[in-house]
Image (tube, rainbow, N blue to C red):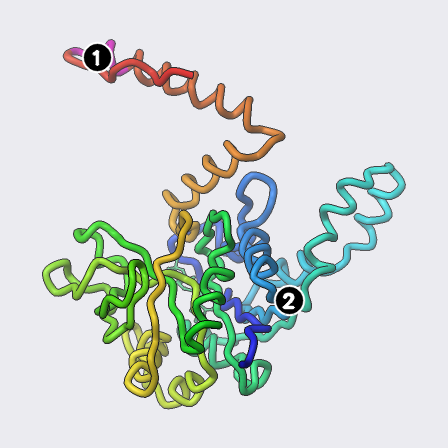
């Protein structure tokens, strides 16, 4: 059996939902508490045993290369100031991965970005991480997916249940139930109206794909918005071989979206030993302030603030 050794991180999108912050920097470099978004996702890849990471980058994405590189000046400074802990922290992750970078010169879609890594992947199954999806899980989401892959040796796509009224925001699968949380994918529909959605199981940004996907991507015509869609190639793949949907254990944050980014910031701050207590107190005080103000409004009653 071929092991999953390599991952593609397509990070060349324009990040329009987060403009103007993403005008001159990739969205995955925005920090959640004290680490850029991409750091959390690379940690997940490492937790799944993947060390070779192929970043497909775009214009003004040098920040990602610099982040996973050595900063001699900064290291000298920290050494001089005897800040050994910080020194370790800034290098830990870069020492553990083998990064490769490919430039997607024009953002022609996610499918096109994945295809750019074809030669670096070769003839083996691989993982794809959409790094704006941050997943908080006890067992890293990709590790859970690799366990499934090792049993069935087929492509595996992470899915999650969404509110049926929200299907317009996702790719939705038509599932055949195999076991609880495990499905064969019969078809996929991009952003369907709730009345046309074949289920409420949405595709999120983690994939394990067999290398046959590359030939299919090569013959995929540009779809919605003139982009080469990964979904179209997967739809062709599932006509040739089984593709499974796996409902992972964990909580996913769409940090490419402003609200999702804020939710991730709050939840990760509440887990961070350095700021947890102070931040919790701040949130409770803020809640009390809002509740008092709401109660003061005519006919207003926001209820009591939470205890604890
Ligand atoms: P999105 O659909 O989230 O697009 O891409 P985006 O440009 O990143 O963000 P918005 O919607 O405009 O705010 C899904 C993933 O595919 C990558 C993105 O970087 C993101 O990780 N992608 C998309 C590419 O690498 N290249 C592309 O041409 C398009």
Q: Which residue does the numbered mark 2 point to in the structure image? A: 51
Mark nearer the N terminus (1 vs 2): 2
Q: Main secondary structure of the magenta part?
A: helix
Q: Position of residue 206 (x, y in %)?
A: 43, 64
- CB of mark 2 near ligand 1 (< 8 Å): no
Quadrant assignment for the C terminus: top left
Distance of label 1 from label 2 (alpha carbons) = 56 Å
Frontmost of labels 1 and 2 is: 2
Please name whichever residue, 228 or 19, is drawn nearer the observer in this view of the structure: 228
Q: Position of residue 241 (x, y in %)?
A: 34, 84
Q: Is residue 179 left or right of residue 46?
A: left
- Residue under the image location 62 percent in, 30 percent down: 274
Magenta span has 295?
yes
Q: Position of residue 53 (x, y in %)?
A: 60, 68
Quadrant assignment for the N terminus: bottom right
Q: Is residue 283 visible?
A: yes
Crowd around label 2: few <14 · some 14–19 · many ≥20 (10 Å): some
Q: Secondary structure at mark 1?
A: loop
Q: Secondary structure at mark 2?
A: loop
Is 125 located above or below residue 160 in the figure? below
Q: Which residue does the numbered mark 1 point to in the structure image? A: 297
Look at the numbered discs 1 and 2 and tell me whether their residues touch, using CB distance below 8 Å.
no
Q: Is residue 25 visible?
A: no
Which quadrant of the view contains residue 183? Answer: bottom left
The stretch in magenta equals: 294-298
Please name whichever residue, 56 or 123, is drawn nearer the observer in this view of the structure: 123
């Amino acid at each position: 059996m071929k092991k999953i050794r390599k991952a593609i991180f397509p990070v060349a999108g324009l990040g329009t939902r987060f403009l103007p912050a993403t005008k001159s920097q990739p969205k995955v470099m925005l920090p959640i508490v004290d680490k850029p978004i991409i750091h959390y996702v690379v940690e997940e890849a490492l937790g799944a045993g993947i060390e070779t990471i192929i970043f497909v980058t775009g214009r003004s994405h040098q920040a990602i290369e610099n982040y996973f590189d050595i900063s001699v000046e900064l290291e000298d400074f920290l050494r001089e100031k005897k800040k050994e802990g910080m020194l370790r922290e800034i290098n830990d992750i870069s020492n553990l991965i083998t990064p490769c970078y490919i430039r997607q010169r024009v953002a022609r879609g996610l499918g096109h970005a994945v295809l750019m890594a074809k030669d670096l992947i070769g003839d083996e199954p691989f993982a794809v991480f959409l790094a704006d999806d941050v997943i908080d899980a006890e067992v890293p989401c990709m590790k859970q997916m690799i366990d499934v892959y090792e049993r069935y040796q087929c492509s595996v796509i992470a899915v999650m249940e969404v509110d049926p009224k929200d299907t317009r925001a996702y790719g939705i699968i038509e599932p055949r139930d195999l076991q609880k949380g495990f499905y064969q994918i019969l078809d996929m529909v991009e952003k369907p109206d709730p009345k046309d959605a074949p289920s409420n199981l949405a595709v999120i940004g983690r994939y394990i794909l067999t290398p046959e996907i590359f030939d299919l991507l090569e013959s995929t015509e540009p779809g919605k918005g003139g982009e080469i869609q990964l979904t179209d190639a997967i739809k062709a793949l599932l006509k040739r071989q089984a593709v499974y949907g796996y409902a992972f254990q964990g909580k996913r944050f769409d940090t490419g979206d402003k609200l999702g980014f804020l939710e991730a910031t709050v939840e990760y701050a509440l887990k961070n030993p350095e700021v947890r207590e102070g931040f919790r107190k701040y949130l409770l005080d803020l809640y009390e302030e809002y509740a008092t103000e709401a109660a003061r409004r005519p006919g207003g009653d926001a209820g009591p603030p939470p205890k604890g």
